[in-house]
Amino acid sequence: MRIGFIIGSLSAQSINRRLLHGLQEVIGNRAELVELRIDELPLYNRDLDGRFPESAINFKRLLKEVDGLIIATPEYNRSMPAALKNALEWGSRPGGQNAFPGIPVGIIGASTGRLGTALSQHQLREVLAYLDMPTLGQPEFYHTFDAAHFDSETGAVSDTNLYRRLGDWATTFFDHVEKHPRGTERS
């Protein structure tokens, strides 16, 4: 199984990147994980629909090569980050050339706030529904970030509860991907 992942933050110190690395550790060799980088995508501009930038072409190509997608999103001002929304715009444009339909997707997120990324994920789910992506509904995965949950030297998950939660979520996500196999929309 080949699973793409998007980190919704552009920060090199992103806590969602750390969370995703923890998820990679838990997943092990159950799937090949491939990052779909969004940091090189320019701001979406409809004027570029006829001459897509190379970074957007590559992003859409990678979307066609995955069996499923994981989005690790932070929450900025009670919303999804602009960089993540921008990536969704590039992947769905130009009109009639949406690369997202049929990709089974799961959302995780970490924030330092008590609500985790609940509001960001809520808004993201609305957009993913419009993009025609089968979205894992349960279990939801909101994590209030604590650096003590990760080994300071290796970055590995050191908190047994977080490790278990990530493992349970991953198992359910893989079941979701298997229930929604990609078909002809890949071509």
Image: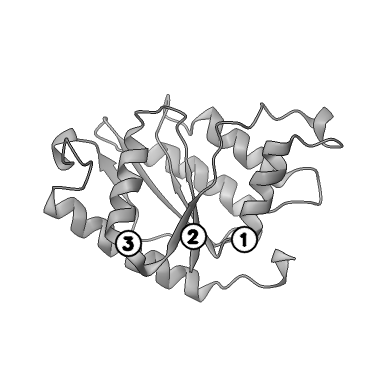
Along the line of sight, which residue is nearer the eye, 82 or 7? 7
Depth order, front residue of 9/37: 37
Name which of mark 2 and mark 3 comes first in the sequence: 2
Residue 27 — which label?
3
Q: Is residue 25 above or below residue 87?
A: below
At 13% from the left edge and 48% from the top edge, which residue is drawn?
159
Left/right of residue 175 with respect to residue 87 in the rendered view: left
Residue 47, placed above or below residue 136: above
Question: Could you say whether the residue bearing mark 2 is in a helix, strand or loop?
Answer: strand
- Say if 13 sits above or below 122 in the image: above
Secondary structure found at label 3: helix
Q: Is residue 117 visible?
A: no
Which residue bears the numbered disc 1? 65
Q: How is the image coloured?
A: one colour
Residue, disc 2: 3
Q: For marks 1 and 2, give the CA distance.
A: 9 Å
Residues tagged 2 and 3 counted as in contact (Cβ below 8 A): no
Residue 28: x and y, percent? 31, 62
Quadrant of the image occupied by residue 187: bottom right
Residue drawn at (37%, 69%), measured in percent from left and top?
Answer: 30
Distance CA(mark 3)–CA(mark 1): 19 Å
- Foreground residue among 113 and 59: 59
Label 1: element kind: loop
Query: Quick one: label 3 or label 1, which is nearer the N terminus?
Result: 3
